[in-house]
Amino acid sequence: MCFSSRSFVIRAAVLMVCGLMPAIAQAQSARTPVRGWFGSGRAGTGQGQSLSLIGRAFEVLDTGRDAVNPELQAGIRYDRQSRQRSFFFAADASSRRYAEFDGPAPVSYDATAGVAANIGRRTRLQVIQGFRTSPFYLVTLAPRPDAAGSIDAASAPESAGQHALFERHTRALTGTVAMTHLLARHTSVTLDYGFERARTEATGFNSHYAKATLSQYLGRYAIARAGYGRRIVSRNGLQFNEKSVHDFDIGLDYNRPFSVSRRTKLMFATGSALVPHDGGHRYRLLGTASLSREIGRSWKAALDYGRNLEFVETFAEPLLSDSVGARLEGRITRRLNFTASANVSNGSVGFAGAGHADNSYDTYGATARLRWSISRLLTSQVEYVAYGQGFGSSVELPERFGSEAKRSEIRVGLTLWAPLVR
């Protein structure tokens, strides 16, 4: 074992022992699961307000380069909720040094705020705004959910283990607005608008999206949808000016347990997109499906499939992919929580041309995590993360963006949640 690996083991052991000492001193008489979200920084749902601080300290072993670096993160979150409206604000700063870059560990900053409110008895409005600045140029090629998420379900800031491509200062601003109005007892209309702006010293990316959707409830388990949306994407710094995508959202959302087992549930949703290509348009069928199963009292497993189309600031053409994923999570004991996930995506950068050029790409990712809830305020954690990506020979890549990349890490550390107002 080389020196850096030995150093990682020693420093990781110190972190784990420091975390376990309070747990050893605690009485073990209670049998119910520990309350809280394993150091997530949320006190639970309900009316009222809360203010909390979140701190994380990790030792990260980059197994590919056999290098050990610390990762520190500090954040704050405020929640206020009543029967008619809710509001949250979260901000964090994180510092980490990557083995492939020299110099001191730089700092990244994130901030997100959101509000949701009932306007009368039939209308609900939700607004979410986010900002990020980082000294690294980061990109995530795995498919992302279409929705930005609900402010009621937004979690505390936590590192996602993204792959750092190269040093380039990046600023990003995102926002979503959604308004849902109940037209009749089983009929509603939703208006959505979202934007994303990302800037570096050499490139710029702008994306605007607007959509209107009419939904008809078909009983307890199905919703029929008919909608139209349009996305306009513009860039500078690439051989590309502006593109627009027409989104025809005509389909069905289905979410129902199987009759033979109430613990097994099937969900799927459909959609489509019309994308300009070679002076004309190309049609793309979209959709997601998920099969989940509750195992015992505290375990859940799921299989996911997605047929996706999305624009990423790194490429001039849209990413078309089919992805498959698996998830498993549950409690081993009342204090020990385990989660694991794996996903594989295969697709292309843009539609295939007449010459059948190799514009393919593929990604894979896997995560396994053990969390020991020492108390409601302190959690220790060990995690393994692996990620890889590859591109065909005809894909136009940005400068210093390699055609292949792999990263695997072991992360060990502590998370502290300090509620100030509850």
Image: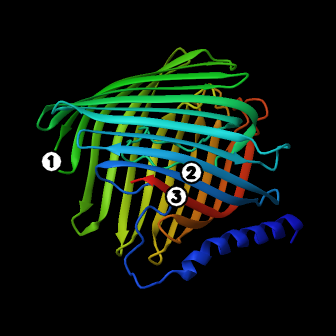
Given residues 263 and 181, the one toward you in this image is 181
Does residue 344 lie above or below 315 as drawn?
A: below
In x, y percent, where is residue 234? 57, 18
* Disc sitting over residue 158 in the figure: 2
Residue at the spot of label 3? 417
Q: How crowded is the residue under tag 1: few (<14 C-alpha within 10 Å), some, or many (20+)?
A: few
N-terminal label among 2 and 3: 2
Residue 314 in view of the camera: no
- Please name the residue shown 61% across and 19% down the image: 235
Does residue 297 lie above or below 413 as drawn?
A: below
Q: How crowded is the residue under tag 3: few (<14 C-alpha within 10 Å), some, or many (20+)?
A: many
Cα distance in 3D space between marks 1 and 3 = 42 Å
In x, y percent, where is residue 312? 58, 32
Does residue 117 lie above or below 389 as drawn?
A: above
Cα distance in 3D space between marks 2 and 1 = 38 Å
Q: Is residue 213 left or right of residue 341?
A: left
- Please name the residue shown 61% across and 41% down the image: 140
> Could you tell me which secondary element the residue under label 3 belongs to?
strand
* Disc sitting over residue 219 in the figure: 1
Three-letter residue code for mark 2: Glu
